[in-house]
Amino acid sequence: DAGVIQSPRHEVTEMGQEVTLRCKPISGHNSLFWYRQTMMRGLELLIYFNNNVPIDDSGMPEDRFSAKMPNASFSTLKIQPSEPRDSAVYFCASSLRGGYGNQPQHFGDGTRLSIL
Amino acid sequence: DQQVKQNSPSLSVQEGRISILNCDYTNSMFDYFLWYKKYPAEGPTFLISISSIKDKNEDGRFTVFLNKSAKHLSLHIVPSQPGDSAVYFCAAGTPNKLVFGAGTILRVKS
């Protein structure tokens, strides 16, 4: 059974460039989450979709970040323009019922993003 | 405003001994708590959870304790094994959101 699939695994790009991270959730899961992991702040929730609809985007740092979920099997997180402080590991997770209670979130292996 | 805090960045334990990882939270609305384990270059994986109506939950070598009055939870691993070496995240949730702590690095020495 395939887990959450993220691509690319690594991305190195120059400041100012557009970056697009991709995620394929587990089939049948109706909730999808984007997280950012940094040494200082740990795992921060950026945005949360339920049934393809954004529910909570209060964690999105600023207008340079945007996320879409055009269908139940695909989501993107875009940064435009990128800045060095965006360098981090970005995780996508999916779950049933919001990953709450006894339906935990399942994480992909992350995208390590480096902005030079 | 960190609602979930793991105050120990790292912990080192001898193989076979008990590992105790701690987590504090500030929001009394949280009613479900989870622990995740993360190996390098992999995503976090779910380990164990506890509802706020309980004070203890066991799963094999792993036990989570919840003290609601102190807003504190802990994860006990007994006996610790070298394969347990990883980053451990605690998370606290409401039906709409999970908030994660910054993580604790556990090293189990053989």
Image: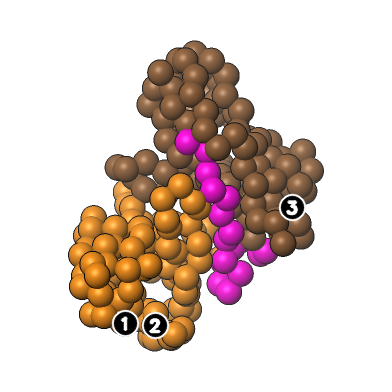
Point out the stretch of residues depicted in magenta.
A96-112
Q: Is residue A14 above or below residue B51?
A: above
Does the stretch in magenta take in A101?
Answer: yes
CA–CA distance between discs 1 and 2?
Answer: 5 Å
The extreme front residue here reads: B110
Q: Residue at x 62, y 37 (%)?
A: A7
**Front-lying residue, A116 or B84:** B84
Chain that appears orange: B
Q: Is residue A10 above or below residue A35?
A: above
**Residues at marks 1 and 2, common chain?**
yes
Q: Residue at x 42, y 35 (%)?
A: A88
- Image coordinates of residue B52 in percent, x first then y, are 44, 79
Q: Which residue is the site of mark 3?
A: A51
Q: Earlier in the sequence, mark 1 or mark 2?
A: 2
Q: Residue at x 50, y 66 (%)?
A: B46
Q: Chain A is which colour? A: brown
Labelled disc at residue B78? 1
Q: Mark 1 is on which residue type? A: Val
Circles 1, 2 touching at the beta carbon (< 8 Å):
yes
- Image coordinates of residue B2 in percent, x first then y, are 32, 52
CA–CA distance between discs 1 and 3?
Answer: 40 Å
Assign a secondary structure to mark 1.
loop
Q: Mark 2 is on which residue type? A: Arg
**Front-lying residue, B44 or B90:** B44
Query: Chain for mark 2?
Result: B
Does the stretch in magenta take in A68?
Answer: no
- Image coordinates of residue B61 in percent, x first then y, are 39, 82
A22 with respect to A9 (left or right)? right
Q: Is residue B30 above or below residue B63?
A: above
Mark 1 vs mark 3: give the one in front: 1
